[in-house]
Amino acid sequence: MNEFLETEEKIVRMLKTVFDPEIPVNIYDLGLIYKIDLDQDGYLLIDMTLTAPNCPAVDFIIEDVRMKAGSVEGVKDVQVNIVYEPAWDKSMMSEEAQLELGFL
């Protein structure tokens, strides 16, 4: 596997350590991450959404994403964009997340 794909895998592993304080499932398995775009210079762009537009933990989550994704070797800077299209719904969750939250 090339170095670029390894770095992207490490980013995903780090995103799986970020949790909404009110939900016991990580943001990646919740389906909140819509795009991970790492360029050759180490600049990372993440498009993500929230389970609710008025999520009170938004600042905490964004900062956690920035810190953890930015800690991956090869990542120089992280920009997190909060997007609302497409609207999030529970079908975007991984099967594990649905099981954990009692949806299966």
Image (spheres, helix red, strand yellow):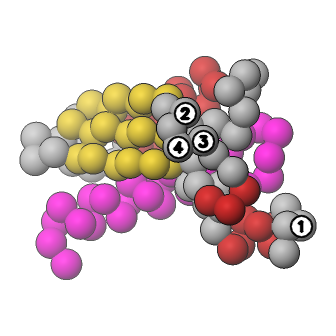
The residue tagged with tag 1: helix, strand or loop?
Answer: loop
Can you tell which quarter of the image residue 45 is in?
Answer: top left
Q: How crowded is mark 1: few (under 14 residues within 10 Å), some or many (20 or more)?
A: few
Dot 3 amino acid type: Ala
**Quadrant including the N terminus:** bottom left
Element assignment for label 3: loop
| Amino acid type for the residue under numbered disc 1 | Gly
Residues rendered magenta in the picture = 1-27
Question: Is the residue under label 2 in contact with that under label 3 (CB below 8 Å)?
Answer: yes
Considering only vertical position in the picture, is 52 above or below 32? above
Q: Mark 2 points at which residue?
A: 84
Q: Name the residue under label 3.
A: 87
Quadrant containing the C terminus in the rendered view: bottom right
Residue 50 lies, in percent from the top left, at 63, 36
Residue 79 can be seen, yes or no? yes
Amino acid marked by disc 2: Tyr
Q: CA separation, marks 3 and 2?
A: 5 Å
Q: Mark 4 points at which residue?
A: 86
Q: Which of 43 and 47 is in front in this view?
A: 47
Residue drawn at the location 68% of the way across and 27% of the way down? 53
- Between discs 1 and 2, the one toward the N terminus: 2
Q: Where is residue 9 in the image (x, y as percent from the top left)?
A: 36, 64
Give the residue at mark 1: 102
Which marked residue is nearer to the observer: mark 1 or mark 3? 3
